[in-house]
Image (cartoon, helix red, strand yellow):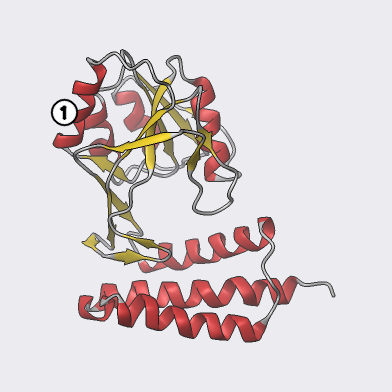
Amino acid sequence: MDKISICLLTYNSDKLLHEVIKPILLIADEIIVVDSGSTDNTLSICRQYTLSPVFNPYITHAQQMNFAISLATHDWVLCLDSDEIADDVLVNEIKKLKNIKINNIKVAYRIPRYWFVLNEPVKTMYPISSPDYPIRLFNRQSAKFNNSPVDDAVEGALMTLILNGRINHYTFHSIHEIFSKLNTYTTRLVKYKDIKPSLARGIISAIGAFFKWYIFTGAWKKGKVGVVTGTYATLYSFLKYFKAWYYDKH
């Protein structure tokens, strides 16, 4: 594999940025930081590690990540968000890979990603179960992020392998952030995808989501965090149809 460029997206990321950067320094031959307009200490923290963030206005996560990939010097890229922390096992696994000659650029690597909400581990975060296994390490000559406006993914690789180790994904640090992103995600979904404008479907979908993502997954056992994730799933399921209905011009 030789050399790896790590592509890191930031936006007001100072809360976890030290923990995110330190492990990847051990494996990166280059770190590309693309920032979408941080107003906190994100940029100064990057400079402490001699990293020079490149500004790019945010449209979608996929477009932002593909832009970062386009800036990379090396074809093998590891793509991370600024709330994802690699553990020691993953770092050592990637170190081993770098010492192996990989001739097949169609190989891509999935990394187990464990989700944390309000700093607590969860088993589900609509519409994802934890851990999930996103492709994050791949050759940019054979794969890239698709154009999905929400929950995008890497496409193009013909064969994937799962790496040892894990990424800890610390999403949603406050109730305010949860509802803010809930509003942003559902608006973006309606804007870019063909969602049927139907209040009835929204109500039915919300009821189904409540039972599936709160009752049947056992989220109700998780106390307040379980209520948060269950509420998120229920509202997300309703709002995407409600907003489609509200903005429908027919």
Number of residue marks: 1
Q: Is residue 55 visible?
A: no
Residue 134, image quadrant = top left
Considering depth in this image, is 241 or 17 the residue closer to the camera? Answer: 241
At 28% from the left and 32% from the top, the residue drawn is 21
Query: Helix, strand, or loop for circle 1?
Result: helix
Q: Is residue 40 above or below residue 108?
A: below
Q: At which x and y percent is residue 116?
A: 27, 58
Q: At which x and y percent is residue 240?
A: 60, 70
At 85% from the left and 75% from the top, the residue drawn is 250
Q: Is residue 50 visible?
A: yes
Q: Is residue 121 above or below residue 9?
A: below
Q: At which x and y percent is residue 31?
A: 37, 23
Quarter placement of the N terminus: top left
- Which residue is the site of mark 1? 92
Q: At which x and y percent is residue 26?
A: 21, 23
Considering depth in this image, is 149 or 142 the residue closer to the camera? Answer: 142
Q: Is residue 117 above or below residue 79?
A: below
Lateral position of residue 7 relative to residue 163, left or right: right
Q: Is residue 174 above or below residue 147?
A: below
In the image, what residue type sits under mark 1? Asn
Residue 225, image quadrant = bottom left
Which residue is outermost to the right? 250
Lateral position of residue 24 relative to residue 71, left or right: left
Q: Residues within 10 Å of mark 1 (few under 14, many from 20)?
A: some
Considering depth in this image, is 136 or 36 the residue closer to the camera? Answer: 136
